[in-house]
Image (cartoon, grey):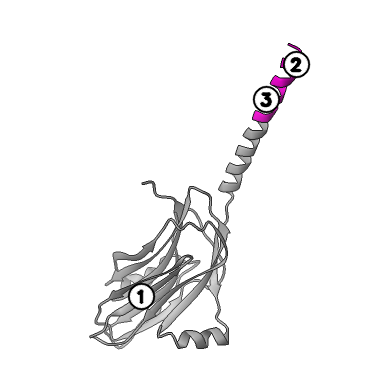
Amino acid sequence: MQGFKPYCSFVILILLLTGCAGVEKDKTSSNAKITVEPYNLSEKESLLISKSGVGHIKFFKLNGTLAEDDDLQISVEVFEKGKFKEELLKTWDDPEKNNKDTLISFGISDFNDEVRPLKLISGIPSGYVTTNYSNKMTSSSFSNLVGEKVTLKKNKPVYLAVWLGTTKNELRSVESENGELPASIAETELAFLYRVLWTYKEKN
């Protein structure tokens, strides 16, 4: 019986420590920090990209560790005549949870040709995905929507870059504060917005 008391005390101590570890783990998960910022190409990198056939491309750096039940969704949102139309190139559930200066990108091969469609390219942590998009735009612009490091907030999308197209003689630029959806997107004929969303993993 005397040996039983120390054994019980030992078991209780282990349970308490395990509980504390669980609380600490939950605390770590809730304090997760995911950031994204523009990545500026070097002169040599820009030269290499110019030989790839990609007309326009923007790069960004991801940093932070995702919890097991977290996910990072990357996609391109399409707006036509100022209204949301569809979501393209959506990727999720990437097995890589620890991002340290991980590069992602959004590129477009713009042929300015009615015969050949635009080719959209999304660079993701595990590779890249592409799709074609037919349109009748005659001029376009391509720009970043974030100029510095942005800390992601759970379930709040961050828009990193935008391609705008028009059939008119002028094209107004759009601006964003910390990657929010630009209000002036309502005045555009065609827009592709590169979006990152930190959220919970979708259950099957």
Relative placement, left or right, of 195 versus 32 is left
Nearest to the observer: residue 80 or residue 64 = 64
Which kind of residue does numbered mark 1 sit on?
Leu
Which kind of residue does numbered mark 2 sit on?
Gly
In the rendered image, which residue does mark 2 sit on? 3
Dot 2 or dot 1: first in sequence order is 2
Vertical position of residue 87 compared to residue 147: above or below: above
Dot 2 or dot 3: first in sequence order is 2
Q: Quick one: label 2, few (<14), some, or many (20+) residues within 10 Å?
A: few
Q: Mark on residue 11?
A: 3
Nearest to the observer: residue 96 or residue 3 = 3
Which stretch did the figure color magenta? 1-15
In the rendered image, which residue does mark 1 sit on? 120
Which kind of residue does numbered mark 3 sit on?
Val
Quadrant of the drawing holding the N terminus: top right
Residue placed farthest to the top in the image?
1
* Secondary structure under the numbered disc 1 in the rendered image: strand
Residue under the image location 29 percent in, 75 percent down: 132
